[in-house]
Image (tube, rainbow, N blue to C red):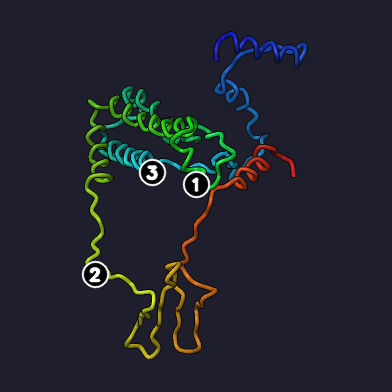
């Protein structure tokens, strides 16, 4: 915001509130002014979150990096290599704001038409607004690199690298040697040596547990009531309708 815009806003306020003295201040000054009467304010101890994050998925790589950095900072303070008054860390911390920042990129692709998978495939690589959103994710990843560059000659840097190696490099795939492909027509017997073994079979189309029984009297599932069914959730226009009705029209029913 420019100085001219600030002056313009002040003028709007002067016209809206004739006789009022308009001044610029800070949130800190406001908190200091009300500190003497803070006991008169109502205390809220419940969640006040809203639907601002509706429909937004976080970047898993950036979140993993951020968690690694948090672990590294804890280690650095535990080893007394970091202090809260460290000017270098204070300077670097400003680059962390973008990592947990609430919008995680641009607000929308501004496309209210291409909802189906086929429509989506046609526009995802051709419409500029989609590309802008992709680039915003990549741009926000850069802030982690900026933080690293700022602390490169600090003891924290090597601790971060150790955490990143543990999170991204020294990762091994699970051992599947003892796993086997399950036939959809096969029934598996659990606790075979028991007087009441459990019988399990899987749905060939859904992969869920279609049959889970113990003797002829105990049936935990059937074809219409299965366990661990995979559910495919679509993201469509109804999600935005709910957002607009709840968040865009606050207080309206």
Q: Which residue is mark 1?
A: 118
Q: CA distance from mark 3 to mark 2?
A: 30 Å
Q: Earlier in the sequence, mark 1 or mark 2?
A: 1
Q: Does dot 3 land on a helix, a strand or a loop? A: helix
* Classed neighbour count for the residue bearing mark 2: other residues with Cα under 10 Å, few (<14), some (14–19), many (≥20): few
* Mark toward the start of the polypeptide (3 vs 2): 3
Q: In the depicted view, which residue is nearer to us: 212 or 233?
A: 233
Q: Is residue 118 left or right of residue 243?
A: left
Q: Residue 221 vs residue 85: left or right?
A: right
Task: Verify CB contact (< 8 Å) between mark 1 and mark 2.
Answer: no
**Front-lying residue, 95 or 118:** 118
Q: Are marks 3 and 1 in contact (CB under 8 Å)?
A: no
Q: Which residue is mark 2?
A: 178
- Residue 124, image x, y percentages: 46, 38
Image vertical order of residue 104 relative to residue 180, above or below: above
For residue 180, say whether it is visible.
yes
In this rendered view, identify the residue nearer to me: 87 or 107: 107
Question: Within the image, what quadrant is residue 156 found in?
Answer: top left
Q: Quadrant of the C terminus?
A: top right
Task: Say which residue appears at 50% left-offset and 78% top-offset.
Answer: 220
Q: Is residue 118 above or below residue 137?
A: below
Residue 239 position within the rendered picture, expressed as x and y whole percent measured from the top left = 60, 46
Q: Which residue has dot 3 on it?
A: 60
Quadrant of the image containing the N terminus: top right
Total of numbered circles in the picture? 3
Front-lying residue, 168 or 85: 168
Above or below, 132 against 187 in this view is above
Res. 248 image quadrant: top right
Q: Would residue 65 be found to the left or right of residue 169 on screen?
A: right
């Amino acid at each position: 915001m420019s100085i001219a815009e600030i002056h313009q806003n002040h003028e709007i306020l002067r016209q809206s509130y004739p006789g009022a003295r308009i001044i610029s201040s800070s949130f800190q000054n406001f908190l200091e002014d009300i500190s003497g009467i803070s006991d008169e304010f109502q205390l809220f101890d419940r969640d006040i979150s809203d639907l601002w994050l509706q429909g937004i998925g976080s970047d898993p790589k950036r979140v993993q990096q951020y968690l690694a950095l948090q672990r590294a900072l804890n280690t650095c303070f535990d080893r007394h290599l970091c202090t809260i008054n460290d000017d270098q860390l204070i300077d670097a911390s400003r680059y962390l704001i973008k990592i947990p920042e609430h919008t995680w990129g641009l607000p929308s692709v501004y496309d209210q038409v291409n909802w189906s998978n086929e429509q989506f495939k046609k526009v995802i690589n051709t419409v500029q607004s989609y590309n802008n959103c992709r680039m915003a994710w990549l741009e926000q990843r850069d802030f982690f690199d900026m933080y690293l560059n700022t602390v490169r000659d600090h003891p924290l840097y090597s601790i971060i690298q150790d955490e990143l190696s543990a999170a991204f490099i020294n990762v091994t795939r699970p051992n599947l040697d003892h796993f086997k492909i399950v036939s959809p027509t096969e029934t598996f017997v659990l606790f075979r040596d028991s007087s009441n073994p459990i019988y399990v079979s899987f749905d060939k189309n859904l992969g869920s547990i279609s049959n889970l029984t113990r003797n002829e009297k105990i049936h935990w599932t059937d074809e219409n009531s299965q366990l661990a069914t995979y559910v495919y959730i679509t993201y469509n226009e109804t999600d935005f309708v709910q957002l607009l009705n709840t968040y865009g029209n606050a207080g309206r029913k």
